Each structure stands twice: as structure tokens, then as C-alpha cells.
């Protein structure tokens, strides 16, 4: 009789547990939540992405063309992308839908993928001890109304959330912000020297060159951000006037300026007179006519002939300072841990008379700084004497907001650089509305060999453009690292299999053992009562 009563109680308890599980699952289908225990919450959508997708006014469809059973590491990428898309859907109030399709074995889907410019890729696959080349699809298309954008191939999930959210913003926006780059005066070529950065920028901005060398046209006020990247020749008065009036009409300017022209191959360096100091002092800053070197520096590889042998050595190069003194308050840089600058110059702030300018220091050199002025020694094999590097720190980047006074206030309009052009009839605006500037004492880090590989320097430049254009949503996403952490490459196949099967079988085995232990304990207790 006792045993029958216990069985009914157990069945009742089991029914209650099942009911609770069912109710929790029903609630889970309506209320989305998750716990992300990673340091930077890399598996959680940023507030900016949630806000973007929650405010969709129409249905956004994502079609992911992914081959099934991708080989490592691409299989982990597809799982990660599926998780991220599921999160977008959860926060979209039903406006975001997605599906995964495999076009590999269906001609119609393959044709559709290629119509969206999603081309197949070839990856190496190890099957039955043979290395084979396999055709795979790893791209997706976002469709919004009659517009669509394609991410043709996703081989790396770093920055995937940024790509998704910036693409969604571009699809739903009626206005694509314009970023202009001042050309001429020895500035780097956008298509060659700055190709990586302009490619990254063009995902969200309309990138356009700006020239002041022909005609008498001013800089278009529809350009949201003007970047002045490392001119090597002095700017003429007309160009300075165009920049000045662009600012006076509310334009935002990023200054990426070196004052030392250096050639690491020949170890030769000389100062540059850009003719802008009087104008920029009126705005509240000047890039110093100096070279900031730092004992806390990046290592470079140097080749030296010794007899008939070429010796390769690594040395710390003070002209390439490693920057770790970075503001933890400013959104442009607060998530960056380290930067490397190349032949930088200091940024000196000079509070202008009659203007209302606020300064936000971004980063500085270390207290092991040595300032070179007039004569520059950039020989990597020069013996570095620690006693020469005694500081103080030098400001190398600053963000400025406020109203600025015109450098041309009370002056005549200069004649255009183009001698065939007529002097335009314009009225000089003498004070700007509230606007922004970023000043960094280095223009090398965004171009050529120094910009290879992206990393924190590329993030700094893109964040600067975002901050100037006042799109801080994208800035907050980009600074996060969404890295999949693979196993160490030196782990043997046996260890991998052991870890894999341990993860599969050990947790259920522990649960079974716990149940068996409890069942045995109860049975022994009942026997004790009967006796």
C-alpha cells in the first residue's frame, strides 16, 4: 500500500516538472533572453544593432547561401552566423526573417545566388586521406523592398555584426553619408595607397575625392566629412580658403598630418612646411614641427651585411611608437588597447580667442618620449640611450567640438589656384556653427605598407570618420572583437577526439550516476524502514 502511494506521488511530481518545462518553453518562444559570459559580450548583439533592427519599418529578408557540411573552420563560421541572424530576428518584432539554403545541388538556387553576385569559392577538404578541392557557397543577400545588398563571401566572422548592421543601415537609409578626401599636394592615392581603408569605408559611406586645383568651385557642403591625409606640399591660399569655408558652413574635418618626411629605406628624414599652422592655430591646434620618438616602440626587422653574409636582426625602433596611453572615456578609442604610429608629430592645443572649443585628448606617447626638432635621426641601428628618453608625454591625437573662427575673417577672398578661373563672388562666413574636428599627428598609419593588415590602426581611422559623421552606433560595434577561438594547432588528433567524446558522453554519464546514486539511497532507506 505504501509503495502504491509513493508511485502516485512520483508520477504527480513528474507531471508537474514536465508542465513547468513546457510553460518555460512556451514563454521562451515569446520572450527572448540569453546569458553571455564572455568578457566583451561577443555573442550578444550590441545595443546599436538591436536598435537598428527594432526600428525596421518594413520586412527585411536575409537569404544565406551556405553549403552544408562545410569543412573546419568554415563550419564554425556558419553556426556563428546562424546564431547572430537568430538574434537579429529576435529583436526585430517580426520584421527580420532569414533562411539558409544550399545551392550546391540545385541549379535554380545556384543561378539565383550568382544573380545576387554570390560566387562559389574553392576550399581544401581532407577526405579519406586525400586532399580535395571543394566548391562551396558562403555568402548572403539582404533584401529590403526593391533594394538589396550582398555580402558575397564570409570567410572570417570578425566584424560580421558590423557588416550586417552597416548594410542594414545603408539599405533602410535614404541618405548615404559622403566622405571626401583632399587630393593633390602629395596626398596618398585613394585607389592604391589607401585602397584597404577606402574599401572598408565604402561599406557605409560614399567615398569621393575632393580637388581644389581646377576651376573656382568651393568644397561641396553636402560632403559630411573631409579627410586631409598627409599632404607633403604646402597648401595654397585658395585651398586653405575652401577648407576654411567648408568648416564655417558646419563641415567636419579629420586632420591626419605628419610634419616630418621620412624614408626608412635610406634613414633620411626632413621637415615639411605645409603652410597651415597659422590657419590651424586659429581653430585651436597646431601639429608640431617635430618627430616624436619613444623608447616604448615597435620592433622591426633589419638586414645588415656582415662580410658575405646578410644578417637579419630585430630591433626596437623609437620612430614607430607603441601607444598605450589611450583615453578610456572617449568612444572613438576607449576600446583600443594599443596603436602603432609611424614617424608621428605632436599635436599642440592652443585655445583660440573668441571661439568656444572643447578638447578631448585621445592618446599620448609614454613618459619615455624623446622629441627631435630640426635634425632627425631615424637610423634603426643607432644605439638607443635610455637616458635620452625622459619625456614628457606628447599628445598625439585630440578630438575637438565647438564653434570655430574663420582664418579669412577681414581678409580678401584669395584667387583660385587655377589661373584661368575667375575669382568667385562669395561672402566670407566668419564663424562656424557647432561642429567637430579630429587631429592626429600621423598620416602614415592609414596608407601603404603601414596600413597592411588592418587591426587597431584601421579601427582608429574608421572610428574617427564615424565620430565626425556622428554615427556612433557603428563605432561601438566595430571596436568589439568577435573572434572564434580555435583549439591550439599543436593538439594531436587523439586529444581532439578524446575532448570531443568527453564533451558528448561525460555530462550525461554524470547525470545518470547521480540518478543511480539517489535511487540506491532511497531503496536502502526503504529497506531500512521495512526491517
Image (cartoon, helix red, strand yellow):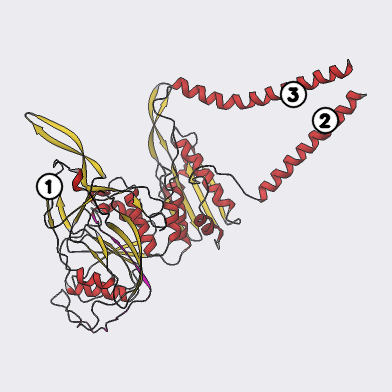
Residue 106 shows up from this direction = no
* Disc 2 target residue: 10
Of label 2 and label 3, which has the lower sequence position? 2
**Would residue 146 be counted in the magenta stretch?**
no
Spatial CA distance of label 2 from label 3 is 14 Å
Q: Position of residue 20 (x, y in %)?
A: 75, 41
Q: Is residue 192 above or below residue 425?
A: above
Spatial CA distance of label 2 from label 1 is 84 Å
Mark 2, secondary structure of its residue: helix
Residue 459 shows up from this direction = yes
Q: Is residue 165 above or below residue 274?
A: above
Quadrant in which the N terminus appears? top right
Spatial CA distance of label 1 from label 3 is 77 Å
- Pick the front one: 471 or 40: 40
Please rate how many residues cluster around mark 1, counting C-alpha atoms within 10 Å: few if below 14, some from 14 to 19, many from 20.
few
Give, as a single range, the part of the protein colored magenta: 421-443
**Residue placed at 38% from the left, 34% from the top?**
123
Tell how many labels. Answer: 3
- Pick the front one: 66 or 233: 233
* Disc 1 target residue: 267
* Disc 3 target residue: 518
Q: Position of residue 323 (x, y in %)?
A: 30, 49
- Pick the front one: 91 or 402: 402
State if disc 3 and disc 2 touch (CB < 8 Å).
Answer: no
Of label 2 and label 1, which has the lower sequence position? 2
Mark 3, secondary structure of its residue: helix
Mark 1, secondary structure of its residue: loop
Q: Is residue 13 above or below residue 298?
A: above
Amino acid at each position: 500500500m505504501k509503495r502504491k502511494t509513493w508511485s502516485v506521488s512520483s508520477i504527480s511530481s513528474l507531471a508537474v516538472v514536465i508542465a513547468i518545462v513546457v510553460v518555460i518553453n512556451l514563454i521562451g518562444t515569446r520572450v527572448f533572453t540569453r546569458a553571455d559570459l564572455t568578457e566583451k559580450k561577443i555573442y550578444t548583439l550590441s545595443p546599436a544593432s538591436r536598435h537598428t533592427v527594432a526600428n525596421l519599418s518594413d520586412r527585411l529578408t536575409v537569404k544565406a547561401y551556405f553549403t552544408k557540411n562545410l569543412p573546419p573552420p568554415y563550419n564554425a563560421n556558419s553556426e556563428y552566423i546562424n546564431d547572430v541572424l537568430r538574434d537579429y530576428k529576435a529583436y526585430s518584432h517580426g520584421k527580420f526573417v532569414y533562411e539558409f539554403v544550399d545551392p550546391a545541388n540545385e541549379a535554380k538556387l545556384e543561378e539565383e545566388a550568382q544573380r545576387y553576385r554570390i560566387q562559389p569559392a574553392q576550399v581544401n577538404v581532407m577526405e579519406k586521406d586525400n586532399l580535395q578541392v571543394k566548391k562551396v557557397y558562403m555568402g548572403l543577400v539582404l533584401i529590403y523592398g526593391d533594394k538589396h545588398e550582398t555580402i558575397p563571401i564570409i570567410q572570417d566572422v570578425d566584424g560580421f555584426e558590423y557588416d550586417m548592421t552597416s548594410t542594414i543601415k545603408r539599405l533602410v537609409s535614404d541618405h548615404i553619408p559622403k566622405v571626401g578626401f583632399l587630393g593633390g599636394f602629395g596626398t596618398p592615392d585613394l585607389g592604391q595607397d589607401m585602397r584597404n581603408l577606402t574599401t572598408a569605408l565604402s561599406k557605409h559611406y560614399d567615398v569621393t575625392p575632393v580637388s581644389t586645383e581646377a576651376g573656382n568651385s568651393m568644397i561641396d557642403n553636402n560632403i559630411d566629412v573631409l579627410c586631409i591625409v598627409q599632404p607633403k606640399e604646402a597648401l595654397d591660399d585658395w585651398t586653405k580658403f575652401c577648407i576654411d569655408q567648408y568648416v564655417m558652413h558646419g563641415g567636419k574635418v579629420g586632420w591626419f598630418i605628419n610634419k616630418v618626411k621620412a624614408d626608412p629605406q635610406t634613414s633620411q628624414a626632413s621637415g615639411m612646411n605645409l603652410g597651415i599652422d597659422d590657419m590651424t592655430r586659429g581653430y585651436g591646434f597646431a601639429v608640431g614641427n617635430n618627430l616624436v620618438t619613444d623608447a616604448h616602440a615597435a620592433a622591426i626587422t633589419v638586414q645588415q651585411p656582415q662580410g658575405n653574409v646578410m644578417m637579419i636582426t630585430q630591433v626596437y625602433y623609437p620612430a614607430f611608437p607603441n601607444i598605450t596611453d589611450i583615453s578610456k572615456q572617449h568612444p572613438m578609442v576607449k576600446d583600443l588597447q594599443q596603436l602603432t604610429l609611424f614617424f608621428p608629430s605632436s599635436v599642440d592645443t592652443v585655445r583660440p580667442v573668441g571661439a568656444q572649443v572643447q578638447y578631448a585628448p585621445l592618446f599620448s606617447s609614454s613618459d619615455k618620449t624623446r622629441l627631435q626638432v630640426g635634425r632627425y635621426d631615424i637610423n634603426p641601428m643607432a644605439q638607443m640611450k635610455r637616458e635620452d628618453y625622459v619625456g614628457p608625454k606628447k599628445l598625439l591625437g585630440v578630438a575637438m567640438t565647438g564653434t570655430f573662427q574663420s582664418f579669412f575673417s577681414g581678409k580678401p577672398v584669395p584667387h583660385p589656384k587655377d589661373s584661368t578661373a575667375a575669382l568667385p563672388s562669395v561672402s566670407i562666413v566668419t564663424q562656424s556653427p557647432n561642429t567637430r574636428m579630429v587631429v592626429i599627428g600621423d598620416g602614415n598609419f592609414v596608407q601603404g605598407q603601414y596600413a597592411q593588415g588592418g587591426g587597431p590602426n584601421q579601427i582608429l581611422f574608421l572610428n574617427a570618420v564615424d565620430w565626425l559623421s556622428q554615427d556612433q552606433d557603428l563605432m561601438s560595434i566595430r571596436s568589439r572583437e568577435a573572434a572564434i577561438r580555435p583549439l591550439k594547432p599543436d593538439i594531436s588528433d587523439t586529444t581532439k577526439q578524446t575532448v570531443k567524446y568527453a564533451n558528448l558522453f561525460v555530462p550525461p554519464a554524470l547525470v545518470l550516476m547521480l540518478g543511480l546514486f539517489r535511487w540506491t539511497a532511497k531503496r536502502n532507506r526503504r529497506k531500512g524502514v521495512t526491517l
